[in-house]
Image: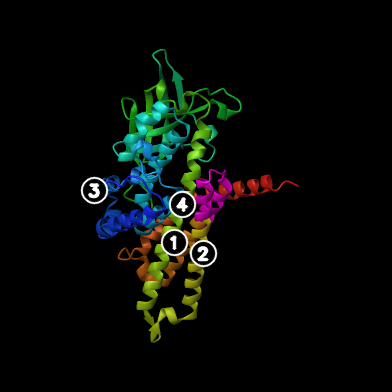
Amino acid sequence: MTQIRTADDTDTRLILDSIDRLLEQHVKPHVQRMEHEDEWPAEIVERMAQIGLFGATIASEYGGLGLSASVYTQIVERVSRVWMSLSGIFNTHLIMATAIQRSGTEEQKQRFLPRMASGEMRGALALTEPDCGTDLQAIRTTAERSDDASYIVNGTKMWITNAANGHAVALLVKTDPAAQPRHKGMSLLIAEKGDGFTVKRKLQKLGYKGIDTAEIQFSDYRVPADCLIGGIEGRGLQQALQGLELGRINVAARGVGLAQAALDEAVSYSQLRNTFGKPICEHQAIQLKLADMATKVEASRLLTQQAANAYDRGERCDMEAGMAKYFATETAMFCADEAMRIHGAYGYSKEFPVERLYRDAPLLVIGEGTNEMQRIIIARKLIERNRV
């Protein structure tokens, strides 16, 4: 395959067609087996790199495709419709790239972004810790400046996507644990694997198979001081949250893709399964389910596109991203459940994709900030934008 370079509106169709061919030829025939065996999709990852997916949102001047969030969400939806795990492999990588592209020094951009765009260096986001998820200000991983122009890092990170098969992480640390407010003591480091950077164990999950999720430990691990994103301490939380805006839009797009897949399976099966002398799609009870599923999927797609458009305009879009993430992922849960009900016993069998969709959906409502947190963000932003 050849590398796609840059994209404008006229190129969108070509890019999406390339994604569709990849999915049809190299993913669909293998997804059931690889997912059930929890197998890292090495060959598929290489093909994703060849068509430029690891540089999807990285600017063309650094070797990426420079795609808008609007086009990117369409890619994520397509990929998630076939195998959601694949979207996680390049999305967490691109959140790290976004932090560097938005907040890094020019030297950092030149050094890291071309390698990330090509897939030579695959990244991850190391924020969460064993005792801290949503409350990132409570992290305990520390980075102390040493005399030889480096930081010495100690701590543990949990639930890190791409940790085992990736090459580097955007590492959120406390450079000043005593700072008040707490976020002023937080910094973000570009941390490549090396001595003191240990992948402790791969975490076993209900769903989201194939992609690695791991616990990582840092023991007197040294990071060069010039790998501090932006070169100034105390801005790490803000830099991480900027990346999570795109991350939440991505998770919303995953929700749309998974929900659409569940709807597709339900529509197809309902025409093949017969009860009482006719296909079950002719029974009103099934028709009501299909109608609800289709309506929610389309509403989710529109909310996600609206959030992506706001992101592309450079607007603050945490409320829009929160709405899209909340509604689309709840829709994924709803559609996965309804598809299983429509399939009956066959939906509970590993023979059909529905059971995989049913296991994958719960991750979406808790990942990238729980949906309970999204509702709080939506309400706060609603009040903030409509002061009396």
Which circle, 3 or 4, is nearer the viewer? 4
Q: Amino acid at mark 4?
A: Ser
User: Which residue does the image show at 36% across and 36% down from the upper left?
Assistant: 62
Q: Do callouts 2 and 4 mark residues in contact (Cβ within 8 Å)?
A: no
Q: Secondary structure at mark 4?
A: helix
Task: Name the residue carrying label 2.
Answer: 296
Q: Give, as a single range, the part of the protein colored magenta.
A: 304-327
Q: Amino acid at mark 2?
A: Lys
Judge left or right: residue 279 versus residue 237: left
Q: CA distance from mark 3 to mark 4?
A: 27 Å
Q: Position of residue 249 (x, y in %)?
A: 48, 49
Q: CA distance from mark 3 to mark 2?
A: 35 Å
Q: CA distance from mark 1 to mark 3?
A: 26 Å
Which sits earlier in the primary sequence, circle 1 or circle 4? 4
Q: Quadrant of residue 343 in the image?
A: bottom left
Q: Do callouts 2 and 1 mark residues in contact (Cβ within 8 Å)?
A: yes
Q: Is residue 219 visible?
A: yes
Which circle, 2 or 4, is nearer the viewer? 4
Which sits earlier in the primary sequence, circle 3 or circle 2? 3
| Label disc, if present, on residue 259 of the rendered structure | 1
Judge left or right: residue 179 versus residue 332: right
Task: Name the residue carrying label 3.
Answer: 43
